[in-house]
Image (cartoon, rainbow, N blue to C red):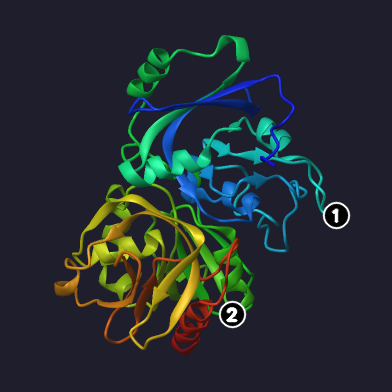
Amino acid sequence: MPPAEPESALGGTLFLEDGSRFDGVGFGARARRVGEVVFTTGMVGYPETLTDPSFRGQILTFTYPLLGNYGVPRRGMVDSNGLPVGFESSSIQARGMIVRGLTAPHHWDSVGTLPSWLEEEGVPGVCGIDTRRLTEHLRTGGVVRGIIDVGPPEDRPSSEELLRAIAQAPSYADEKYMDAVSPRAPEILGGDRGPLVAVLDCGIKTSILRALIERGVSVLRLPYDHEVPARFEGRRVSGLLVGNGPGDPKQLARTVEELRRPSTRALPTLGICLGLQLIALARGASTYKMKFGHRGQNKTIVFPDGRALIVSENHGYAVDPKSFKPSGLRAWGMNPDDGTLEGLRDPRGNTFALQGHPEGHPGPQEAGFVFNQFVGKVKRRA
């Protein structure tokens, strides 16, 4: 039985800049959005995935064929530190959503449907297209820009009109995302429960912040381009975390420069996802755009001691393994499927980074020991 299509009076179209067109059923908001079309292989966790700031500027295709079965949890709820519960940020970050099929929710914690959530947040979605063919197309040719259009089915736009709209939009790498995903001013999370860890926030997931606080440290959340202070409100800063976020890491020159400052570089430092790339750039390495990236919950990291762990990943850029050797950093993990560099560390172990997400959400958390190691170094320094 094919996946269900929503009962909708809307038409939905995904058009790629290479001329490929996919017509289906529209859901969510009546809107038109241009973005980089990518795919994720994760089977669960669409509320966390859609609200992950790393997906800012992208039209997200889900390869799992049936979504919406557990609805959407209550929005607006926060924990004792003011962080959203059940989501990775306060709103949907993806520009659009592409799915094969939708179904009605059946879950005790659901307060609404996936289509209604997208409509409330102004995000268009397209259902009923062959996402397998789309994914194969992206894997073969690489990710491309595209446009998603949801409106009356009898008035679908022409391919020529959609191609013109794509041409008038900025490229993914040229867009400025930090104003939308980075905080405007410093704030402390976690009270005064433990040593203070600075976080350069380039669009960090709330689960990373929560993982730190749960391990007994306080968090100084800083804008992406803020100087990392030696002290803040009378408290010593004892560590630094640089997390995930959207866009080309080379665009964040001010963050890279801050990571080069001797006082910042002296701190115990953990990089996650984009953070790994920024640390590598600060040490003189180079990054490159991947053909179709790693986005899913079953990515493998192999460590030098032979351990292999499964992590969630969401990145379209990577560090050139040949470029970081003069930097003093060493490879700490590799992807066995394509040889992508998955981990870096310095010889002293003061700085280390993972391309994957040890916090999971969604996905496995078996690499959570990375947080334990980092917090241990922070507490010894405090």
Location of residue 14 in the rendering, given as x and y in whole percent from the top left corner: 49, 28
Measured as percent of width and height from the top left, residue 281 is found at: 25, 61
Nearest to the observer: residue 380 or residue 315 = 315
Q: Is mark 1 on a helix, strand or loop?
A: loop
Q: How crowded is mark 1: few (under 14 residues within 10 Å), some or many (20 or more)?
A: few
Name of the residue lying farthest toward the front? 1
Examine the image and state in which quarter residue 91 appears. Answer: top right
Identify the element where label 2 is drawn. loop
* Residue density around tag 2, few if under 14, some if 14–19, many if 20 or more, within 10 Å: some
Measuring 38% from the left and 63% from the top, which residue is drawn there?
275
**Of the image marks 1 and 2, the number of the one nearer the N terminus:** 1
Residue 310 visible in the displayed image: yes
Rendered residue at 57%/51% (across/down): 49
Marks 1 and 2, how far apart in space? 36 Å
Location of mark 1 (residue): 108
Residue 288's disc number: none
- Residue type for callout 2: Gly
Q: Is residue 102 above or below residue 270?
A: above
- Residue identified by numbered label 2: 194
User: Image point 26% across, 59% down: which residue?
Assistant: 257
Relative to residue 152, is residue 112 drawn left or right? Answer: right
